[in-house]
Amino acid sequence: MILALCRAASLLLLCMVFVVCGAFIFNKELFDIFYFLDFLPDYVLFLLCVPSVFFLGKSKRYLVPLAILAIFLASPFKVSFFSETPSEIAGKNSQIKIASYNVAQRVEKAQLYNWFIEQNLDILFIQEASRLGQFNVGEYDGVYTNCVQRLCILSRFKLQELDSLDRKPLGGWGRFVSLHSAKIKGKSVLLANVHFASISNFGYRFNTLKGFESKVSLFKDAKAVEFGLAQALLDKWSDNDAVIIAGDFNITDRNYQYEQYWGDLYNLFAVGGNGYGSTRKNRLVSPRIDHLLVSNAFTPIHSEVGDDMGSDHLPIQGVVVLKGAESE
């Protein structure tokens, strides 16, 4: 009797693995309570397979390998097949180095500026900049700066501030999108610095399962509104297809909602990164929720996560080439 129950439990756990992995692979929406399963580390899914090894009979010979394959296909782990270095793929003069960093008001602007120079970045998108340490226009020679509340940009290209979106009409606070334009290699490029809603905006305490579901549902709806407004703003200002969107999305790129709104853009780490690329520091769950996105006017080359500078996030960096500028 006990053995039969163990076998049934093992099969149930395997079914859970297949369902969750299938949702990731095919970008299908499950119930609201499953919204954050994209944060689930791979080791949790592997652990769910362990009982099958001990309690299933001959069926484990094909069920367990299939489950492991499903985990592999659904994993956020990325492998870049670019064997060349960025300088071998395209000349250095045509490369654009960009980065995004949620500093959580913990990194001083002098440190950020020095990192910008040391990494030889062309554009740095900053979220949650300290109000006391924001960058002033004309503060540095040869580097253009602009801050819209706590969304700041450092750029080697001259910036023109276009528009922004405030969360106040949605019942929140702060700007969650700032839009600029810059002339890069003779072409006009839209630069969107974004910081979309976090679950913390809706409180941490979930006293009941129903309460948890309602908060997640509210969070998901808020995300859809913010994503839709951001896309409408981009459509309003876009007179070409050269767009860079960078910032803290607070969801991973295997979330079905991410795929729905941003799936037509290149995610630099998904294309040119290696490993998990975790950008949110956490002992148990370390997802990649900070993204660098570009339109098909760019060729993505490389991406990596930078070193810890004191925030609860890590910076993410990338290299792209603006099409048509390769020979310039």
Image (cartoon, rainbow, N blue to C red):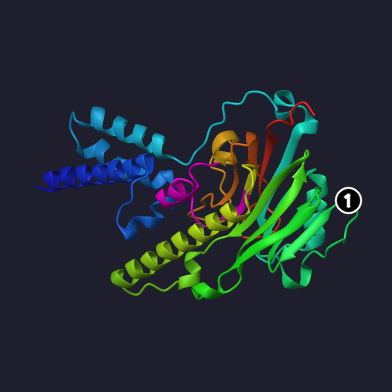
Q: Secondary structure at mark 1?
A: loop
Can the viewer see residue 282 in this picture? Answer: no
**Magenta segment boundaries in residue numbering:** 245-265
Q: Residues within 10 Å of mark 1 (few under 14, many from 20)?
A: few
Q: Which residue is mark 1?
A: 142
- Does residue 84 appear to the left or right of 146 in the view shown? left
266 vs 54, nearest the viewer: 266
178 vs 92, nearest the viewer: 178
Q: x, y (%) of residue 174?
A: 61, 71
39 vs 232, nearest the viewer: 232
Q: x, y (%) of residue 209?
A: 30, 69
- Does residue 314 appear to the left or right of 215 in the view shown? right
Residue 121 magenta: no
What residue is drawn where x is 60% and y is 58%? 194
Q: x, y (%) of residue 20?
A: 32, 46
* Residue farthest toward the right in the current orientation of the protein: 141
Can the viewer see residue 205 in this picture? Answer: yes
Question: Which quarter of the figure is the C terminus placed in?
Answer: top right
What residue is drawn where x is 42% and y is 44%? 42
Badge 1 amino acid: Gly
